[in-house]
Amino acid sequence: MKKKTKRATKEKNKAINHHQALREQLVSLLKGGQAHVHFMDAVDGFPEAKRGTFVEGLPHTGWQLMEHARIVQWDILEFSRNPKHVSPGFPEGYWPKTPVPPDEAAWAKSVQGFQHDLQEMIKLVKNPKVDLHSAIPYGDGQTILREALLLADHNAYHLGQLVDLRRALGAWPES
């Protein structure tokens, strides 16, 4: 009987370690780095005068990409934790109304909102009381794991677009 108890405890600890390792990897993916640019590396130093500028061959301005990434991240976060959340209309609700930020404060607010919501998603993923694998009760089969991966993927895609745009605008610090 003693061997079964030790084995069960060992298996339980192993499962806990796997869950913790998954959470750590998700947090790392959400934060960026390694194969993805960090959020602040993509937006720091983006010239105010160029945030609403289109470049031939690229479909969006810096403002459109920044605000779109913020809105989508907010929507994914709120869906993940709030059963009463209502997503914006698609696609119009996920993009800013203008290609140019109304002012410097709007850009700063968007950057701060993105950072805040990213930290909130990270807190959700880190929370050991949150089951990453169970279907979200008010969803259509989505899990927190799926939402975190979706968010990381979406952010990486659009932050990469921001870097490409900054390069095309001559506003990326080449090293």
Image: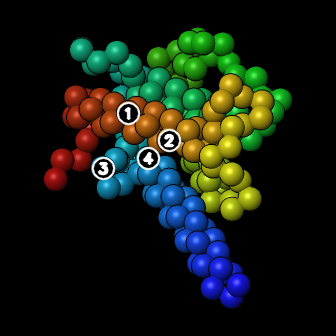
- Coloration of the structure image: rainbow
Q: Report, in whole angstroms, how far the alpha carbon at label 1 lies from the one at label 4.
A: 11 Å
Q: Residues within 10 Å of mark 2 (few under 14, many from 20)?
A: some
| 126 in relation to 3, above or below | above
Which mark is nearer the camera, 3 or 4? Answer: 3
Q: Which residue is mark 4?
A: 39
Left/right of residue 93 with respect to residue 44 in the rendered view: right
Q: Report, in whole angstroms, how far the alpha carbon at label 1 lies from the one at label 2.
A: 12 Å
Q: Are marks 4 and 2 in contact (CB under 8 Å)?
A: no
Q: Are marks 1 and 4 in contact (CB under 8 Å)?
A: no
Q: Which residue is mark 2?
A: 149
Q: Which residue is mark 1?
A: 157
Q: Report, in whole angstroms, how far the alpha carbon at label 4 lies from the one at label 2.
A: 16 Å
Q: Earlier in the sequence, mark 4 or mark 2?
A: 4
What SS does tag 2 mark? helix
Disc sitting over residue 76 in the figure: none
What SS does tag 4 mark? helix
Q: Which residue is mark 3?
A: 35
Q: Report, in whole angstroms, how far the alpha carbon at label 3 lies from the one at label 4.
A: 13 Å
